[in-house]
Image (spheres, rainbow, N blue to C red):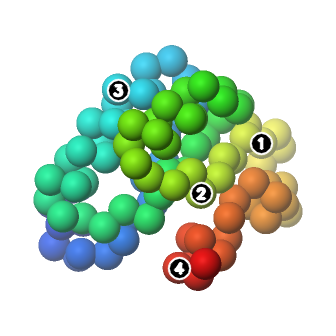
Amino acid sequence: FIDIFEQWRLPVILCARTALGTINHTLLSIEALRARSIPLIGIAFMGEEVADTQRTIVEFGGVPQLGRLPHLGPLTGETLRDAMISGFDLAMIAGGD
């Protein structure tokens, strides 16, 4: 799908798991986006908080952490909305300061 994102030239929010193996995978994805000059807004983490992993990706990748979405159970519109409001920097995602 990177070819499509390259054609669209729209800013991307990269979603990354917080599980084992995500550091290498995510840093390679950041590198691939930059190699094609695809704008990257930041990283949205998915899963339970793993502070060391998240910090490593943000520091080595040179990208902002937009937030983290924990596992939601049950997943409803309300639980998703509440998690997004409490776990993400919505102004940064929208392009504000």
Q: Which residue is mark 1?
A: 72
Q: CA distance from mark 2 to mark 1?
A: 18 Å
Q: Of the residues shown, which amino acid type is indicated by label 1? A: Leu
Closer to us: 93 or 1: 93
Residue 11 placement (x, y as % from top left): 36, 71
Q: Label 2: which residue?
A: 66
> What's under tag 3, amino acid-wise?
Asn
> Which residue is labeled 3 in the image?
24
Between label 3 and label 1, give the one nearer the viewer: 3
Q: Say what amino acid the circle numbered 4 marks.
A: Gly
Tell me where residue 89 sits by quadrant. bottom right
**Rendering quarter of residue 87:** bottom right
Residue under label 4, please give it.
95
Mark 4 or mark 2, which is nearer the start of the sequence? 2
Q: What is the crowding at mark 1: few (fewer than 14 residues within 10 Å), some, or many (at least 20)?
A: few
- What SS does tag 4 mark? loop
Q: CA distance from mark 3 to mark 4?
A: 27 Å
The amino acid marked with disc number 2 is: Leu
Q: What distance separates the C-alpha of mark 3 from that of mark 1? A: 25 Å
Q: CA distance from mark 2 to mark 4?
A: 11 Å
Q: Give the x, y percent position of residue 69.
A: 68, 47
Q: Earlier in the sequence, mark 1 or mark 4?
A: 1
Residue at 77%, 42% (x, y): give it.
72
